[in-house]
Amino acid sequence: MFKTLVSDYDGTLYINSVVSDDDIKAIHEFKALGHHFGIATGRSLGSILEEIAKYKIPFDFVIANNGAISIDSKGKILHKTIVDLNVVHDVLESLTGDHIQFLGYRDWE
């Protein structure tokens, strides 16, 4: 029976602007036992993949954008939620006149 461990990134795995070598080693050991490791974060997919590459974090899956997209270790999309464009327009229209600026960003296909 395998186990699955999911870690948040900022403030959990990434502490004081670094992912520790001890944590990377522990993840490798956990995976060597046949278990699965993933990261769940509010970060965008592109941002977390940069961090994973930077620290060479072994992973089986990533859940990014507060759950809006998840991928496996090969980059295959497992889940993606897209908000209907009409809903986006309705929300933006409701903000008109409230002196609110909105910037939308997406970094996946």
Image (spheres, rainbow, N blue to C red):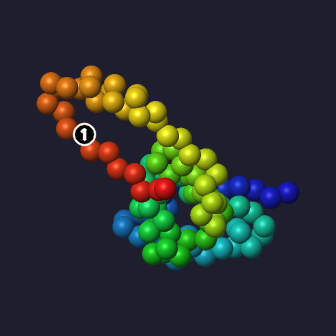
Structural crowding at the residue carrying mark 1, measured as other residues with C-alpha within 10 Å and reported as few (<14), some (14–19) or many (≥20): few
Q: Label 1: which residue? A: 102
Residue at 50% x, 52% y is 64
Image side of residue 105 versus residue 3, left or right = left
Question: Looking at the image, how many numbered discs can be counted on the residues?
Answer: 1
* Residue in front for this viewpoint, 55 or 14: 55
| Rendered-image quadrant of the N terminus | bottom right
Element assignment for label 1:
loop
Residue at 49% x, 40% y is 82
Percent x, y of residue 12:
48, 57
Image side of residue 3 versus residue 21, left or right = right
- Is residue 61 depicted above or below 21 in this figure? above
Image side of residue 95 versus residue 35, left or right = left
Residue 20 visible: no
- Is residue 101 depicted above or below 36 in this figure? above
Percent x, y of residue 105:
35, 50
Q: State the residue lying farthest toward the right.
A: 1
Percent x, y of residue 91:
33, 27
Tell me the amino acid under the disc marked 1: Phe
- Is residue 55 depicted above or below 109 in this figure? below
* Residue in front for this viewpoint, 98 or 3: 98
- Is residue 65 depicted above or below 33 in this figure? above
